Structures are given as structure tokens and as C-alpha cells.
Image (cartoon, grey):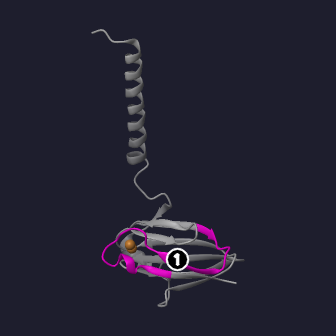
Amino acid sequence: MNMHKYEKVWMLFGSGTLLVFLIVVGVSAFYMGNKPPSCAVTLDPEEVDTHTLFKEPGLTQIGDNEYQLTIVASAFDYDVGNDEKIIQIPKGATVHVSSTTKDVIHGFEIAGTNVNMMLEPGYISTYTNTFKNAGTYTLVCNEYCGVGHHLMAATIEVIE
Ligand code: CUA
């Protein structure tokens, strides 16, 4: 068979890029594992209630102007440590947020800030944010999780 020189070159280029693509996909899916980008630490989703970080959700001061905020998500609720579902954060504070889910995948977005995570059972999602502007922010679930998805919310008040 008589093939044009450029045809060979382009076929080689085409198969080459396909091979590179398959290797990249294969490595990221099977070698690096399938986990949300903001999750490094794992836990047993059955034992969230007794886990050191999550047995008492809420805001804890851990340093000068530094706080730890832990929140447990479940269908269809955010446990922030109080029934009012309000967390008050002093303006300018650096907050280390840790969250996880007890059941299905939930979202974790504090609208109007950079905090936007995915919560997967078995993983602890973390994000550090400095709340520079006072105001009321809403924590919402942005992953569809079932019939009560739209009910999942809590309030973050950044106070002067
Ligand atoms: Cu939880 Cu949508």
C-alpha cells in the first residue's frame, strides 16, 4: 500500500497523542485513586459521631485570631453545633474548616467566599479561609443529594 508521507506522520501523531491521553487518564484514575481534591484524610463514615474532630461540631478558638470550624453534613442537615444553625466568626479571623458527611455526597459552599468543597463519605474535606468582610453568608449544599437537598443550609455571620 502506498501511503503519503504526511499521512503517515499525522497518523503517528494521532496515535501518539491518544496513547499519552490514555496513560494520563489511567494514572490519575487507577494509580492516584479517585478522591475529591480537597480531601487528604480519611475516616470511617459510620463513626463520624465519635470522631475526635466531629463529635462536637462548631467553632473552636485555636490561636490568636485563628479558629477551627467543624461541620458534619448528613441528609438533609448541617450539624454546626447549635439548633439555630448559626456560626459567628470574628471579622479577619483565619478559619480552618473541616467537614465530612455521614451518608451520601454533599456539597459545602459558603456563598460569596472561596469556600467550596465536595463532601464524600469516608473523607475529611478541609479548607482554610480568612473572613475579611463582615456580613451574613449562607452555607449551602451544591451537590444534589436527594429530596431534601434544598433544605440543607446554615448561616455564617462574620461580625465586627
Ligand atoms: Cu446535601 Cu444537596
Amino acid bearing label 1: Thr
Inspect this view and state whether residue 52 appears.
Answer: no
Q: Quadrant of residue 3?
A: top left
Which residues are the magenta region?
128-154
The local crowd at label 1, few if under 14, some if 14 to 19, many if 20 or more residues have their Cα within 10 Å, is many
Q: Secondary structure at mark 1?
A: strand
16 relative position to 159: left or right: left
Q: Is residue 68 left or right of residue 2?
A: right
Residue 78, horizontal then vertical, whole percent = 44, 80
Which residue appears at 55% of the width and 68% of the height? 115
Q: Quadrant of the N terminus?
A: top left
Work out which residue is located at the far right of the displayed protein and give it.
64
Numbered label tally: 1
Mark 1, residue position: 70
Residue 153 location in percent, x, y? 45, 80
| Residue at the (52%, 82%) spot, across then down | 155
Q: Position of residue 101 (x, y in %)?
A: 41, 72
Which of the two residues, 28 or 21, is positioned nearer the viewer here? 21
Front residue of 110/102: it is 110
The residue located at (42%, 57%) in the rendering is 35
